[in-house]
């Protein structure tokens, strides 16, 4: 029995090393090399087979039949591995190029091998459906006819997240031919592998729920442990300053506010001008205000007072080498600084030198700075400010001031308004006729509403975006939560984590802050949901914001019985919000990519983020135990807390991974692609599953070993989220 435990443990550790190495190789040498060296090799499959065999021996040696819930859980994992083995050995998967009106009967795998279909597939038509009033793709839809050898025809539709199945073959919309009008399908034939794997998922879900509710399970024993009774122990700021300067000229705030309520086509989405102004200002300056001016005033300043703004040091330059090239001393450059180094050749000489030295990091920094320069230039010239909609020939198009693309076959009055309307507003601004300017802005908005009609966002959606912009103070809230969390954490440590020794006003204040922060984030996330039209979990900012909200919800749900979770909730939520605001601005609210338009995605991300929040609590509990290690009784009680939190955390992580696998199978035709995010999520799951096996791995019964392990294990969570998103890349990367 001891040898079996050693064998299983050794195999798991070896697999963790192999998986981590594979993701690094993929980053350095590409996906093809990683698959050839690791994922597609017989020895890699053999390792998983050996792990499955060790798992089977573990079931027998530990006599898990006496604990049905634990046995079902382990058997479910074996079934999932068996399904993966069937898929690896028998599945057919490849791509089909389907031109219009041409029967196709074969598809090709990555190695160019052809697979024959027992029927013909003919593409009748292909459509790109767009979001109303924009060119942003909402879905890709192919209409096909399948003809069997007996002449029977079956019609069907293939689109994103809508699979067409026929005789065991599944067709997924993968791409399209922009020139010929054809489609690209992923074709998969894996009836047995998918059926066995899904059966394993169902067994695993049943087993996890069984473990949580079974009176004989370790989790329920922990729930009734004395250490988890009420009142028992349970589960630096950066500031930047800008160089003071005279405030450049712009329009009054009232006029700018009216401009903020105009519609504009920005990033293939119809939104308030206020949103455009906030993103523009944040991209340049790193904040949504400048020298006391609102974002709308900043954008208006560049539009109407270019000469006053071109010398203004508002463009944030992070890289010191780029600042040296621009010849600036502080962190902010003016548009004139960029124009100067471009006109005298200084910038080109620097680029040539950096290319010769292969200094890719500085070249990327130059490209980022140049992007800001281009954005400012486009706004100042007006080409980026598309305020004028035109419903022409049944299609809504948006134009910038004076655009040469405005059709000539329209009413002369409308044509003049589109071409010269902003010129008239410019004259009013120069005359400082603010009342006249506001009247024109209101007239422009009336024109937008009339021309855009039902293709414009609804009034509710439009106003929700204005409210969201005005309420979004995530960075300030993050700093507040982190500060209060640190203070409360230190106070708890000072009293030896005996919460009853803290003044009542401290606990009341913590609860009030938790409630206010949770209500604030609930409103903010709700507004973002209304504006975007989908659950806001589609990018790095939104997932971190969701993690912060979940941390607050968990802390509020547990704080009455276990007050110690309050500093953990404050710190986790504050740090998550701070990470969300690390970028130059909040990621734009964009139309959802067609492949992401699935309810499974929202469930997958929400479950994973909840697991991460619990694992963060576990890490903070470990830190507290290390700081108070002289109190052995406290350290032991904190271990009970950690073990209690570990069960739902691991189960949620497992459920999130497999929900994601089902979504991937629906969207891409494969439930597992060995993408770096998938691999590191699996690594994290294995790492955190080990401490659950206290019977087989008795070291985890030692309190300090358990706490230190949980602190170090959180590194895998950080790599899974940040390492993959910003370093390793892959399909899941937000970079």
Image (spheres, grey):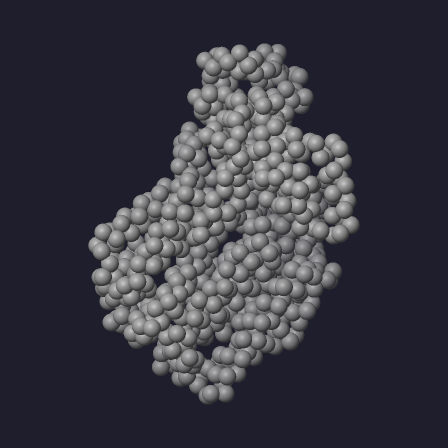
Q: Is residue 547 above or below residue 561?
A: above
Residue at 56% from the left image edge and 42% from the top image edge:
139
Nearer to me, 648 or 369: 369
Instruction: Judge by depth and name the residue closer to the eye, 341 or 684.
Output: 341
- Locate residue 701, reporting x and y percent: 38, 78
Residue 343 visible to an observer of this rendering:
yes
Residue at 67 percent across and 50 percent down: it is 361
Percent across and percent down for residue 237 are: 44, 49
x 52%, y 26%: residue: 246
Q: Nearer the viewer, residue 438 or 85?
A: 438
In percent of the image, x 34 and y 47: which residue is there?
A: 518
Left or right of 531, for residue 317: right
Of 48 and 113, the residue lying toward us: 48
From the viewer's perspective, is 155 left or right of 70?
A: right
Where on the picture, by quarter, is residue 653?
Answer: bottom left
Q: Quadrant of residue 32?
A: bottom right
Tell me: 178 left or right of 547. right
Q: Position of residue 253 (x, y in %)?
A: 45, 23
Residue 347's place in the image compared with 558, above or below, is: above
Residue 495 screen position, x and y as percent = 27, 63
Whether residue 137 appears in this view of the structure is no
Task: Give the total number of marks visible in the rendering.
Answer: 0
């Amino acid at each position: 029995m001891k040898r079996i435990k050693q064998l299983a443990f050794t195999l798991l550790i070896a697999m963790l090393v192999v998986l981590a190495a594979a993701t690094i190789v993929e980053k350095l040498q590409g996906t093809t090399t990683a698959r050839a060296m690791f994922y597609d090799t017989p020895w890699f499959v053999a390792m998983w087979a050996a792990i499955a065999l060790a798992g089977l021996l573990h079931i027998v040696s530990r006599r898990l039949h006496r604990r049905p819930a634990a046995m079902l859980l382990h058997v479910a994992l074996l079934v999932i591995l068996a399904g993966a083995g069937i898929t690896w050995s028998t599945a057919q998967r490849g791509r089909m190029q389907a031109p219009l009106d041409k029967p196709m009967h074969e598809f090709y795998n990555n190695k160019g091998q052809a697979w024959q279909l027992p029927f013909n597939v003919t593409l009748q038509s292909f459509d790109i459906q767009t979001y109303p009033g924009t060119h942003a793709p909402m879905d890709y839809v192919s209409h096909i006819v399948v003809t069997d050898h007996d002449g029977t025809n079956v019609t069907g539709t293939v689109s994103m997240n809508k699979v067409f199945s026929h005789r065991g073959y599944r067709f997924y919309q993968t791409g399209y031919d922009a020139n010929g009008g054809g489609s690209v399908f992923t074709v998969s034939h894996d009836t047995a592998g998918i059926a066995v794997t899904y059966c394993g998922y169902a067994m695993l879900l049943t087993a996890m729920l069984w473990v949580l509710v079974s009176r004989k399970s370790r989790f329920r024993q922990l729930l009734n442990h004395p250490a988890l009774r009420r009142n028992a122990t349970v589960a630096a700021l950066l500031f930047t300053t800008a160089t003071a300067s005279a405030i450049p000229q712009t329009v009054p705030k009232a006029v700018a506010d009216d401009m903020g309520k105009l519609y504009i086509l920005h990033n293939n989405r119809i939104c308030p001008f206020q949103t455009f102004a906030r993103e523009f200002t944040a991209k340049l300056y790193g904040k949504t205000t400048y020298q006391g001016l609102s974002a709308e005033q900043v954008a208006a300043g560049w539009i109407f007072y270019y000469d006053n703004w071109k010398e203004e040091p508002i463009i944030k330059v992070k890289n010191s080498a780029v600042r040296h090239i621009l010849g600036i001393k502080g962190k902010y450059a003016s548009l004139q600084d960029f124009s100067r180094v471009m006109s005298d050749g200084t910038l080109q000489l620097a680029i040539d030198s950096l290319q010769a030295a292969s200094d890719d990091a500085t070249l990327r920094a130059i490209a980022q700075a140049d992007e800001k320069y281009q954005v400012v230039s486009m706004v100042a010239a007006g080409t980026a400010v598309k305020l004028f909609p035109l419903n022409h020939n049944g299609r809504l198009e948006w134009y910038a001031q004076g655009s040469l693309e405005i059709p000539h076959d329209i009413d002369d009055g409308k044509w003049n308004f589109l071409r010269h309307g902003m010129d008239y507003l410019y004259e009013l601004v120069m005359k400082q006729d603010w009342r006249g300017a506001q009247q024109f802005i209101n007239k422009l908005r009336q024109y937008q509403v009339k021309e855009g009609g039902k293709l414009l966002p609804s009034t509710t959606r439009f106003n929700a975006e204005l409210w969201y912009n005005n309420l979004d103070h995530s960075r300030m809230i993050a700093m507040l939560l982190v500060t209060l969390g640190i203070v409360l954490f230190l106070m708890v440590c000072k009293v030896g984590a005996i919460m009853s020794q803290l003044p009542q006003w401290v606990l009341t204040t913590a609860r009030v802050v938790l409630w206010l922060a949770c209500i604030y984030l609930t409103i903010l996330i709700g507004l973002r949901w209304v504006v975007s039209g989908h659950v806001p979990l589609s990018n790095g900012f939104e997932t971190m914001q969701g993690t912060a909200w979940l941390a607050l919800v968990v802390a509020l749900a547990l704080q009455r019985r276990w007050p110690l979770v309050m500093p953990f909730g404050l710190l986790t939520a504050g740090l998550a919000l701070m990470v969300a605001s690390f970028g130059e601005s909040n990621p734009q609210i964009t139309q959802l990519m067609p492949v992401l338009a699935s309810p499974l995605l929202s469930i997958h991300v929400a479950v994973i983020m909840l697991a991460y929040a619990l694992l963060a609590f576990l890490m903070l509990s470990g830190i507290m135990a290390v700081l108070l290690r002289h109190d052995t009784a406290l350290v032991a009680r904190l271990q009970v807390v950690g073990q209690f939190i570990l069960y739902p955390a691991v189960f949620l992580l497992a459920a999130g991974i497999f929900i994601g696998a089902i979504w991937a199978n629906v969207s891409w035709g494969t439930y597992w692609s060995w993408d770096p995010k998938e691999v590191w999520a699996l690594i994290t799951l294995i790492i955190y599953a080990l401490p659950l096996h206290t019977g087989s791995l008795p070291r985890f019964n030692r309190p300090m070993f358990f706490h230190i392990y949980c602190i170090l294990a959180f590194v895998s969570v950080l790599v899974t989220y940040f390492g993959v998103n910003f370093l390793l890349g892959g399909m899941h990367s937000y970079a």
